């Protein structure tokens, strides 16, 4: 059997739907706002997607309770608890100590369920000694060690167990979440690790675009958006500098990294949570969503905009999702991805879609999930 270190960061992603843009140091606030733990559900999706052969060949070294045991025991008898939680609330220290034991026990791969913060904690211990694979469950996930979905991560593990995948260097990136909540994006390179790699199943590191031409094209996209936004619909604008340009032209201050709502050229909701968006949708029956994909990664839903949840998208209608992006970003992004956590909705959002890329200009781009 092949030893696999497996751990879950239970609080990863808890701040996403409630608009906190992360989980670091804000767990209590997230809970007050109605935030719910999502990591266990993502880990269950991962295990459900594993085939029987992989489950028979893998031996999982894991942690007690909600850091791994609760999920692992539902799907396999091939596991051992090697790290016992000392208290109910987990911390980065628990992740690091578990990884130290995984190394001592000669694990061949560490699979973790979390976000960039968890990836950073794992990398701090293992460096490049053994490869790592992330099951995406955080809010912003800019690092390139994650599968595009939990199911994709499962397929990567299957290939790794069958010795049918190669390793590549993966960047671990993390942001200053305090500045992120203040609408300032400060992304830093933290470490490089090895990760098993299958094209289209592993996400790329986020890429940032900035040039004079980019700004001009963003303005052209925004001008076109303002034309069709005169239909009295409620418009939910996702994060990003491309969507922000729409508000700039209206003289409205948009949150660069949050979700805002515009109706009849006026701001009717700023830095909204999922619950606040759903309340607006009760008031305004006709609504549309404008989103821009993450550079190079290509995610239009599921990374950094969890406030626009599957509930929100279903209420608005998948047919009322509008994608905007500059040609440079599209050139660097071969495919677009969705990971809402709702597989049926992801299928509806998939296929060839029109992406507005200039004034009355669009490109067809393939949107996919796993």
Image (cartoon, rainbow, N blue to C red):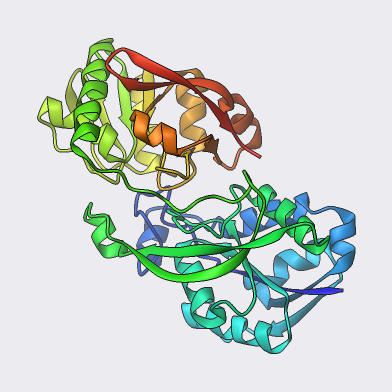
Looking at this view, name the residue that lies furthest to the bottom: 104
Q: Is residue 273 left or right of residue 81?
A: left
Q: Position of residue 41 (x, y in %)?
A: 63, 54
Quadrant of image for the N terminus = bottom right
Q: Position of residue 341 (x, y in %)?
A: 59, 43
Say if residue 91 shows up in the picture.
Answer: no
Looking at this view, name the residue that lies furthest to the left: 251
Give the residue drawn at x 27%, y 16%.
Answer: 359
Q: Quadrant of residue 280?
A: top left
Q: Is residue 87 left or right of residue 103?
A: left
Quadrant of image for the C terminus = top right
Q: Is residue 207 above or below residue 230?
A: below
Say if residue 264 shows up in the picture.
Answer: yes
Looking at this view, name the residue that lies furthest to the top: 231
Q: Is residue 117 above or below residue 273?
A: below
Give the residue drawn at x 40%, y 41%.
Answer: 274
Q: Is residue 319 left or right of residue 201?
A: left
Q: Position of residue 333 (x, y in %)?
A: 47, 37
Q: Is residue 343 above or below residue 15?
A: above
Q: Is residue 142 left or right of residue 198?
A: left
Count all numbered tags in the image, as a single digit.
Answer: 0
Q: Position of residue 71 (x, y in %)?
A: 72, 64
Nearer to the camera, 42 or 207 = 207
Give the residue drawn at x 51%, y 23%.
Answer: 318
Q: Quadrant of residue 74?
A: bottom right
Q: Quadrant of residue 223?
A: top left
């Amino acid at each position: 059997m092949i030893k696999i270190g497996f751990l879950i960061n239970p609080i990863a992603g808890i701040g996403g739907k409630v608009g906190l843009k992360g989980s670091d140091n804000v767990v209590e606030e997230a809970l007050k706002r109605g935030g719910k733990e999502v990591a266990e559900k993502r880990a269950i999706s991962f295990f459900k997607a594993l085939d029987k052969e992989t489950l028979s060949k893998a031996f999982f070294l894991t942690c007690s309770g909600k850091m791994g045991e609760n999920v692992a025991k539902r799907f396999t008898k091939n596991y051992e608890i090697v790290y016992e939680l000392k208290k109910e609330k987990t911390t980065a220290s628990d992740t690091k100590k578990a990884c130290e034991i995984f190394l001592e026990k000669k694990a061949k791969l560490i699979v973790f369920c979390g976000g960039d913060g968890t990836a950073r904690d794992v990398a701090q211990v293992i460096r490049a000694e053994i490869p790592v694979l992330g099951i995406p469950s955080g809010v912003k996930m800019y690092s390139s060690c994650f599968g595009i979905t939990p199911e994709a991560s499962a397929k990567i593990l299957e290939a790794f167990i069958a010795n049918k995948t190669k390793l590549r260097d993966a960047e671990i990136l993390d942001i200053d979440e305090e500045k992120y909540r203040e609408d300032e994006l400060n992304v830093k390179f933290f470490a490089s690790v090895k990760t098993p790699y299958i094209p289209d199943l592993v996400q790329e590191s986020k890429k940032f675009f900035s040039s004079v031409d980019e700004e001009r094209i963003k303005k052209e996209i925004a001008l076109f958006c303002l034309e069709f936004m005169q239909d009295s619909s409620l418009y939910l604008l996702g994060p990003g500098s491309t969507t922000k340009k729409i508000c700039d032209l209206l003289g409205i201050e948009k949150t660069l990294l949050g979700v805002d709502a515009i109706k009849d050229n006026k701001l009717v909701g700023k830095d909204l949570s999922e619950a606040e968006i759903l309340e607006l949708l009760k008031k305004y029956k006709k609504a549309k969503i404008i989103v821009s994909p993450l550079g190079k990664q290509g995610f239009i839903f599921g990374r950094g905009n969890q406030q626009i949840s599957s509930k929100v998208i279903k209420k608005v209608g998948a047919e009322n999702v509008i994608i905007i992006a500059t040609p440079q970003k599209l050139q660097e992004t071969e495919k677009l991805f969705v990971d809402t956590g709702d597989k049926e909705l992801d299928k509806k959002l998939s296929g060839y879609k029109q992406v507005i890329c200039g004034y009355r200009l669009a490109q067809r781009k393939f949107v996919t999930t796993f």
